[in-house]
């Protein structure tokens, strides 16, 4: 859905990997990930992440409560706009129904062969205007056979991150099975904390000079 450069826009977020804009198109608002302002030395990883998101959104096209891919031209990724607030802005405290719906949403995603892979970040969970859960930001999503051992492992990690949020906001409703899932960490998680996370923190905080507060949003 190409839109002219003079379409009204509003910046939602900006970091080293581009800008997130709310664009007023002829058929209504949509969200654009604009890589045009990305520094030259980061354009390749920014393009790779946007391309990864575009592939994942194309794969789950038509699914409810996730963005719909509108266009990807190598510089701009356009997706449908979903009205709502990030979890940290509107926490679902004590909302058992919300967490049940969030688990069903994850199950639908995993059945389609997609693992989100970045659900520790509260900013990637939305509470929609009518109170439903929704998912955004599929830059790290993985596509594969949902029956494979690898995808089942990633799906379990997605679930663990949801249950960590449930433990934060709806602890009393955790079931015995959910508590066991939370206690059983995978080798993927252990490897990430031992190797990937220190590198991630060094790159984002020392080189890129930005802090996402572990995805929970800006610190007060």
Image: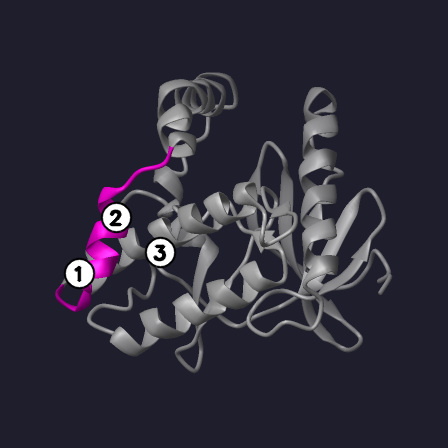
Q: Is residue 220 magenta?
A: no
Spot occupied by residue 62 in the image (x, y as percentages of width and height): 69, 73
Q: Residue at x 71, y 19 (%)?
A: 41
Seen from the viewer's position, the closer of residues 8 and 46 is 46
Front label number (2 vs 1): 1
Left/right placement of residue 38 relative to residue 172 reads right
Q: Quadrant of the N terminus?
A: bottom right
Seen from the viewer's position, the closer of residues 148 and 126 is 148
- In primary-sequence order, the first of circles 3 and 2 is 3
Q: Is residue 207 above or below residue 142?
A: above
For label 1, the SS is helix
Decide: few, some or many residues near mark 2? Use Cα within 10 Å; few <14, some 14-19, many ≥20: some
Q: Residue at x 45, y 18 (%)?
A: 199
Front label number (3 vs 2): 2
Residue placed under numbered mark 3 in the picture: 162
Query: Disc 1 versus disc 3: distance between alpha carbons?
Result: 15 Å
Q: Which residues are magenta?
A: 172-186
Residue placed under numbered mark 1 in the picture: 176
Decide: few, some or many residues near mark 1? Use Cα within 10 Å; few <14, some 14-19, many ≥20: few
Pointers 3 and 2 in contact (C-beta within 8 Å):
no
Query: Disc 2 versus disc 1: distance between alpha carbons?
Result: 10 Å
Q: Is residue 143 above or below residue 7?
A: above
């Amino acid at each position: 859905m190409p839109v002219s450069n003079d379409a009204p826009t509003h910046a939602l977020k900006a970091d080293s990997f581009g800008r997130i804009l709310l664009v007023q198109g002829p058929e209504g608002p949509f969200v654009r990930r604009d890589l045009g302002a990305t520094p030259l030395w980061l354009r390749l990883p920014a393009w790779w992440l946007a391309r990864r998101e575009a592939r994942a959104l194309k794969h789950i096209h038509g699914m409810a409560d996730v963005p719909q891919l509108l266009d990807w031209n190598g510089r701009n990724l356009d997706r449908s706009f979903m009205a709502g607030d990030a979890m940290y802005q509107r926490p679902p405290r004590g909302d058992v129904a919300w967490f049940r719906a969030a688990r069903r949403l994850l199950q639908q995603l995993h059945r389609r062969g997609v693992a989100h892979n970045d659900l520790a970040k509260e900013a990637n969970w939305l509470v929609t205007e009518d109170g439903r859960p929704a998912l955004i930001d599929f830059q790290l999503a993985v596509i594969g056979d949902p029956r494979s051992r690898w995808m089942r492992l990633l799906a379990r990690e997605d679930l663990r991150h949801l249950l960590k949020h449930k433990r934060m906001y709806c602890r009393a409703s955790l079931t015995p099975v959910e508590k066991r899932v939370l206690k059983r960490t995978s080798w993927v998680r252990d490897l990430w904390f031992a190797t990937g996370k220190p590198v991630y923190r060094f790159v984002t905080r020392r080189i890129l000079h930005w802090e996402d507060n572990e995805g929970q949003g800006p610190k007060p």
